[in-house]
Image (cartoon, rainbow, N blue to C red):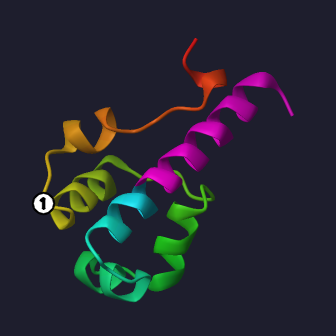
Amino acid sequence: MDERKVRKKEQLVAFGEHLRSLRMDQGLSGVQFAEKLGVDKQFLSRLELGQSDPRITTLIRLAQALDMQLSDLLNQMKYPPSLEE
């Protein structure tokens, strides 16, 4: 796997971990959050595991469901050291 693909995978995993943390901070189960988003639990699971690359419309819906601005959703994310370069 080339370096760009590895970095993208690391980014998706980091975002998924961030998303799961935000969801749990709000006391929502995966099923509850999926229902709030209007998606199935499997889709949410793929996002949280870093197995899906969300579209901008999905990111906007995630931010709305978490009662936050999209910029805050993305800016509060903690990147692995390998991605901070």
Tell me the crowding category of disc 1: few under 14, some 14 to 19, or many 20 or more residues within 10 angstroms, Cα based: few
- Residue at (55% x, 44% y) in the render: 14
Look at the picture and state if 85 lies above or below 12: above
Classify mark 1: helix, strand or loop: loop
- Residue at (31% x, 52% y) in the render: 59
Q: Quadrant of the C terminus?
A: top right
What count of labels does the image hold? 1
Q: How far from the left and from the top, in percent, is residue 16?
A: 51, 55
Q: How far from the left and from the top, in percent, is residue 34?
A: 35, 80
**Residue hosting label 1:** 67
Query: Toward the viewer: 28 or 64?
Result: 28
- Residue at (52% x, 63% y) in the render: 48
Q: Quadrant of residue 45?
A: bottom right
Answer whether residue 12 is magenta in the image. yes
Q: Is residue 22 left or right of residue 50?
A: left
Q: How far from the left and from the top, in percent, is residue 74?
A: 32, 38
Q: How far from the left and from the top, in percent, is residue 81?
A: 62, 24
Look at the picture and state if 53 lies above or below 44: above
Q: Quadrant of the N terminus?
A: top right
Majority SS type along the magenta span: helix
Residue range in magenta is 1-18
Look at the picture and state if 37 lies above or below 16: below
Look at the picture and state if 44 lies above or below 73: below
Query: Toward the viewer: 54 or 70?
Result: 70
Amino acid type at mark 1: Asp
Q: Residue furthest right?
A: 1
